[in-house]
Image (tube, helix red, strand yellow):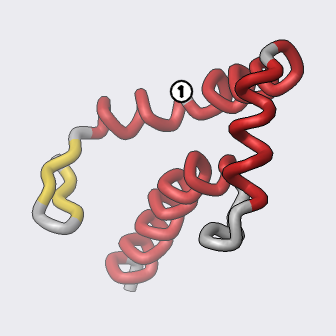
């Protein structure tokens, strides 16, 4: 078990999380093309002045953090 910010996370949880990224992004892409209401909501969200980030950033950022944590741990324990 890995402890990140006092929240225990199992390797199986991390694997599921990583493995579900591509299907989630594919579903967003599919909905964007096939569902006009979804496309409108998506575009409205991204055009708001409150949020300057694309929706996909919220999906990808946690994955990027996992990679960053891995690099930190590797550098800390490789010496």
Horizontal placement of 29 versus 49: left or right?
A: right
- Residue at point 48%, 63% (across, down): 65
- Residue at point 67%, 51% (across, down): 45
Q: Of 1 and 27, which appears nearest the observer? A: 27
User: Residue 79, position in %: x, y?
Assistant: 38, 86
User: Residue 74, position in %: x, y?
Assistant: 43, 71
Q: Of 37 and 78, which appears nearest the observer? A: 37
User: Residue 64, position in %: x, y?
Assistant: 56, 60
Horizontal placement of 13 versus 20: left or right?
A: left
Element assignment for label 1: loop
Crowding at dot 1, Cα within 10 Å, few <14 / some 14-19 / many 20+, comes out as: few
Q: How many labels does the image show?
A: 1
Question: Which residue sits furthest right?
Answer: 33
Question: Which residue sits furthest top?
Answer: 34
The residue where tag 1 is placed is: 20
Rendered position, 2 above or below 36: below
Rendered position, 18 above or below 59: above
Q: Image quarter for residue 76? A: bottom left
- Residue at point 62%, 27% (across, down): 24
- Residue at point 68%, 48% (across, down): 56
């Amino acid at each position: 078990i890995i402890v990140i910010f006092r929240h225990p996370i199992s390797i199986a949880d991390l694997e599921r999380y990583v493995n579900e990224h591509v299907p989630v992004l594919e579903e967003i892409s599919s909905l964007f093309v096939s569902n006009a209401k979804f496309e409108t909501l998506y575009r409205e969200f991204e055009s708001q002045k409150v949020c300057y980030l694309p929706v996909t950033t919220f999906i990808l950022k946690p994955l990027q953090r996992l990679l960053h944590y891995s690099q930190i741990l590797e550098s800390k324990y490789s010496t």
